[in-house]
Amino acid sequence: MDWQQLPAIKGQRGFAYKISIIHLSTRIKYSEIHHNHNTQTLAGFLLRAMERLPPFYIVFTDNHMAFTMKFAYRSERQTAFSKLAKNLKVIHALIAKGKPWRNGFIERSNRTDNEALFNQKRFTCEEHRRYELRLWEMYYNRQRPHQGLDMMTPLELARKQHFCHISNLALC
């Protein structure tokens, strides 16, 4: 799981943040765009992602203070994100500090999103950008074959692996 800063839409001020998570075994991706990336926003995103992805029990993040207070002055404190993960019985694993390639699936996903969507389209408003992201992810999850998945789509692999849970799988 990670977040990425998006540039302001032409004629508007401020940044937006794309928060994404990838289910490692199926490569199903889920993303949302928000105006901030604070710990409450990330916790809410995790909760919605758990409803939309096949079952998972571990989430990898970097060491940003929105995810963990491990390197803060009061390192015993917990963020809203880490509290929620604990309550959901999801292991919150941190990648090594200063080594983003250890979370390579999500970093590569951010690059793919930039190349295939954000660098290709001109958005008229924030709602347009959110709509195009949802369309792109529907294509990514349902139609785009992945070489690492033996040319299957993430949805095909999810159906194969999690056929008994597929009624709970909402890829929208």
Image: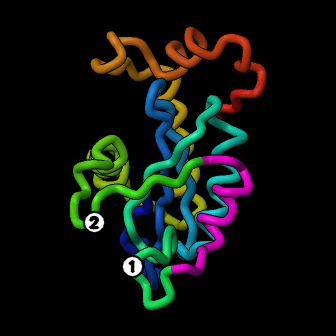
- Of residue 100 and residue 131, the one placed in the foreground of this image is 100
Color theme of the render: rainbow
Q: Which residues are magenta?
A: 76-90
User: Mark 2 falls on what kind of element?
Assistant: loop
Residue under circle 1?
A: 71
**Earlier-in-chain disc, 1 versus 2:** 1
Q: Is residue 77 on the magenta stretch? A: yes
Q: Dot 1: within a 10 Å radius of its alpha carbon, few (fewer than 14), some, or many (20 or more) residues?
A: few
Residue 97 disc label: 2
- Residue 6 x %, y %: 39, 67
- Of residue 131 and residue 2, the one placed in the foreground of this image is 2
* Quarter of the rendering occupied by the C terminus: top right
Q: Is residue 17 on the magenta stretch? A: no
Residue 116 visible from this viewpoint:
no
Q: Quadrant of residue 80?
A: bottom right
Q: In the displayed image of the protein, which residue is found farthest to the right?
A: 167
